[in-house]
Amino acid sequence: LNTGLSIVSVAAQQAKPPDGGTAGSADANKTAAPQTDKAIATMQKQAAALVQQKHYKEARDLYLQVLGRQEFLSGKTSKELIGPLNDIVKTSCMAGACYDAMPQLKRLLEIKRATYGNNYADLPFNLQLMGEACEKKGKYAEALNYFNQAVEAQKRIGGSKNNIDMMLA
């Protein structure tokens, strides 16, 4: 049966604010939360399936919708955005387009620093990823800056040397 609606468009429709509620409206957020959580979960499952099929652009588009919906629910600086931002970055990098995710990488870094401080465990990895993205775009000075920050963060945080070894390999 062809209804003219794809799974993606149905998920996108489910993600829209119910009854025309606006972001920041307490009443809209209270009524939207249960339905939205289900819509977000549905979109995340669909995006994960698209990643498995190596349809990275489509998966990234769905993850961007998840991010938008989570922003609507939680605010633009909420730690609830860490998961969707990670998904966007991961999917972009899998597609060979890490640099396209630099806005999300920078935002992820800001939210994680605000949430966990400047010494969270995967800070060196986040900085390294930003350096690699810049390096692939030929932005060597910027890349070197991120790589140096990653090494300094790894020294400061301690833990496994594997991250530094990986960065220097």
Image: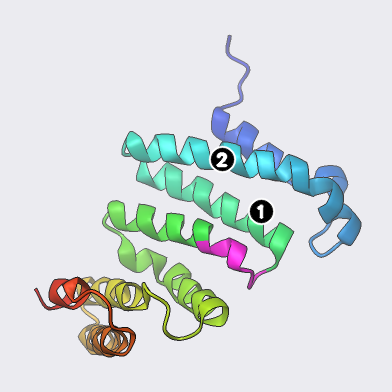
Q: Secondary structure at mark 1?
A: helix
Is any part of residue 62 visible from this angle?
A: yes
- The residue drawn where x is 76% and y is 43% is 34
Q: Dividing the picture into quarters, in which one does residue 157 lie?
A: bottom left
In the rendered image, the residue lying farthest to the left is 169
Q: Which residue, given by chain and number where applicable, does mark 1 sit on?
A: 69
Q: Which quarter of the figure is the C terminus placed in?
A: bottom left
Residue 107 lies, with reference to residue 15, above or below; the image says below
| Picture coordinates of residue 10, whole percent (x, y) | 64, 32
Q: Earlier in the sequence, mark 2 or mark 1?
A: 2
In the rendered image, the residue lying farthest to the top is 1
Amino acid, disc 1: Arg
User: Range of the magenta residues?
Assistant: 76-82
| Picture coordinates of residue 8, whole percent (x, y) | 55, 34
- The residue drawn where x is 68% and y is 44% is 37
Left or right, residue 127 beside residue 21: left
Q: How is the image coloured?
A: rainbow
Left or right, residue 118 beside residue 16: left
Q: Which residue, given by chain and number where applicable, does mark 2 sit on?
A: 43
| Picture coordinates of residue 106, whole percent (x, y) | 45, 76
Q: Which quarter of the figure is the N terminus placed in?
A: top right
Mark 1, Cα crowd under 10 Å, few <14 / some 14-19 / many 20+, is many
Q: Secondary structure at mark 2?
A: helix
Q: Dividing the picture into quarters, in which one does residue 56 lie?
A: top left
Is any part of residue 21 visible from this angle?
A: no
